[in-house]
Image (spheres, grey):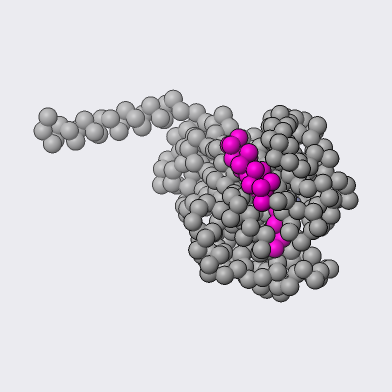
Amino acid sequence: MNFKGLKLLCLICILVLSISWASTESCDFVIENVKLFDGSKVTEHANVYVKDGLVLRIDTNQTKINCKYKYLIEGKNKTLIPGLINAHVHIQSREDLKNSAQAGILTVMELLRLQEDSIAIFKSLANEAIYSDFYTSGIGVDMPDAVIKFYIQSLNPYAPKTTMDVELFISERIKKMVDFIKIYQDSRLPEKFSDTLFDKIIFETHKNNLLAIVHSETLKDTRYVFNHGADIVAHGWVDNLFTESDLKKWKERAFYIIPTLLAHTEIKKQLNPKSYTLSEDEIVGEVGRLHKAGITILAGSDAPAHGLNFTTDFYRELGLYVRAGLSPFEALKTASINPAKAYRLKNKGEIKVGAYADLVLIKGDVLNDINQLNKIESVWKKGVRIK
Ligand SMILES: [Zn+2]
């Protein structure tokens, strides 16, 4: 076939393809001409097509909408972002999951649940669109008289004291349907893990293909847990500025930090405990320094700890990242694609063809002003409009 013939064949193919798209494709709804943040990039004028709870197609507003839709949303002067992920919460009731979902936070990661009997119930709630998807660690690994006791005034009844106990502890958590393992490390408390025990906890966690998420409040403990194999650090530190040699190490492998900045700044303002030796500006500034150096930040609020809510306080957390020097684009990543990658969540944290249609439509340009998160117009969970 000569060049002309090939060209003709291509044209025919394109024609046939576009006719078949126009005549056979149907979808549930289309969001037209919207500014799209898909988790990794921004498209100024996009059309997003949704069908059966998934993103069916994304094109630009240059393309004529040929899909038979049930309804169409005008996206002009609005921003569409993926359903947000809160990387650190403690769910108390189904209302918390409902409120999170209404706020566009369609996935929550719980980093301690003492009442493990309720795990199955909370997970099954996620089948209803009005509730956020729920992932949990169940009860954390801690020494009996250590961090959990310090905060909750009750001993951890399952605390493993020997390496044999650790194996049993992890297998029990798996039976209870946990999604990852939370570990409590605080070397300031009188009762703490031996190296052998800590290493065994990480070993068993990884052997079962689970992530090890470790609570740390000091730089010393963050260094320790990194050196001993932690995947994600919750809270970070408020006592010292990290150094270049820390960075060099932390960049050697995937390592994620949930800085819970709002909780830290509230504690600093309200209580100013002795352990908070850094100033508020320094605590916030550490997140900017980490981000600049290429360490991945995950947004987590720790609600309802310190009186924080499951809704707008999460936006305030992102606002603090912007204060730390992240752009709104980068701050949104900490609540979408970053936690999806860190927690190995499939088809979440991104708006792409084939992903869940977890969508949040915001009035105005949230990529210009992160506070626009307070102007959410609509929320869809897996294609179902819940706001
Ligand atoms: Zn917490």
- Give yes or no for residue 306 being in the magenta stretch: no
Instruction: Judge left or right: residue 288 versus residue 156.
Output: left
**Residue 147 in view in this figure:** yes
> Where, quadrant-wise, is the C terminus in this rendering?
top right
Judge whether 147 appears above or below 71 on screen: below
- Give yes or no for residue 201 being in the magenta stretch: yes
Q: Which residue: 54% across, 38% down?
A: 347
353, 136: nearer the viewer: 136
266, 232: nearer the viewer: 232
Instruction: Judge left or right: residue 247 versus residue 170.
Output: left
User: In the orientation shown, which residue stands out farthest toward the top?
Assistant: 24
Q: Which residue: 81% across, 69% down?
A: 273
Query: Picture coordinates of residue 323 (x, y %)?
Result: 63, 68
Instruction: Judge left or right: residue 157 versus residue 361.
Output: right
**Residue 97 in view in this figure:** no
Instruction: Judge left or right: residue 267 versus residue 68.
Output: right
User: In the orientation shown, which residue stands out farthest toward the right?
Assistant: 153
> Where, quadrant-wise, is the N terminus in this rendering?
top left
Query: Picture coordinates of residue 363 (x, y %)?
Result: 62, 54
Judge whether 331 appears above or below 54 on screen: below
Q: Which residue: 25% across, 30% down?
A: 12
Count of picture labels: 0
Query: Picture coordinates of residue 80 (x, y %)?
Result: 57, 49
Q: Which residue: 55% across, 56% down?
A: 296
- Magenta-drawn segment: 195-218
User: In the orientation shown, which residue stands out farthest toward the left?
Assistant: 2
123, 191: nearer the viewer: 191
Query: Picture coordinates of residue 121 (x, y %)?
Result: 77, 30
Q: Quadrant of residue 177?
A: top right
